[in-house]
Amino acid sequence: MNDKHYLLLIAHPDDESMFFIPTLFNLIKESTPGSVRILCLSNGNFDGLGKTREKELHAASAIISDKVQVSIANCIDIQDGPNECWDPKIIVSIVDKYIRKHCLQDVVLITFDKYGVSGHKNHIDTHFAAMEYYQMRENKEIRELWTLYSVQSVLKKYIPIVPILELIFIWVFSLFQTNSKMRNINTGTRQYMMLNPMLVWKAMKAHTSQFVWYRRLFVIFSRYSYVNDVKIHKRVSDSKTKT
């Protein structure tokens, strides 16, 4: 067990289940109860289902683990929409207030990379706001910033044969004692692996309003259901080269 706090910063309800479950699953295993948190910036009200999606996020998180704490900011100036521009200063304020309200220290902030996984503008805005917050010199609470690598290759994104075969080998070799794994690829990249597609399916199914046919296919075939590659960033002041 470690004493870090992990804060997953997402843009919409269901982001946690579609993209981040391998990371969440592994962090929950290695952390003390209450150390893994989700902060969702909007309630996903683009189709007028905000209140429903709030309940769905809490239900999905409970399926992933009853140890995960969930908060939804739902600021009037941060609303779901592919054409909505989110002011990074507002997001920075939301995250900062959350961390100070809960008196969090040694925080690992986890979010999207600059491509936003699916290219959604809200995801990308979330990334740049997190980067801005992390680089603030007066910010002492954030220990690290991790961003989820956006897989550009369609083949690697939707036919993740190699990582699945590797996970099956690990699973069998360990006599079914584990179905997840973390490894450091290099000094700046960490990989979280998980062979539990039913967990992802159940979590996404809790997002009933969003669980349409193409998201069901996504859960089965997406690399993000099995593998997360996360980049560990360095502060500009801590390194001669910006990462």
Image: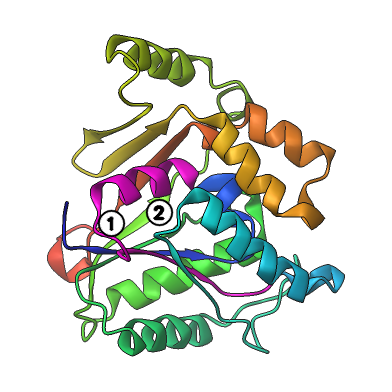
Q: Which residues are magenta?
A: 21-43
The amino acid type, in three-letter code, at marker 2 is Thr
The part of the image, by quadrant, that contains residue 186 is top left
**Image marks 1 and 2: residues in contact by CB distance under 8 Å:** yes
Please determine whether, in this image, residue 211 is positioned above or below residue 40: above
Task: Work out whether residue 102 or residue 83 is closer to the camera in this orientation and state it.
Answer: 102
The answer to whether residue 182 is left or right of residue 3 is right
Task: Work out whether residue 48 or residue 145 is closer to the camera in this orientation and state it.
Answer: 48
* Residue at which label 1 appears: 233
Task: Work out whether residue 187 or residue 202 is closer to the camera in this orientation and state it.
Answer: 202
Q: Quadrant of the C terminus?
A: bottom left
The answer to whether residue 98 is left or right of residue 159 is left
Q: Is residue 125 magenta?
A: no
Q: CA distance from mark 1 to mark 2?
A: 8 Å
The amino acid type, in three-letter code, at marker 1 is His
Residue plotted at (53% across, 15% down): 161
Q: Which mark, residue 147?
A: 2
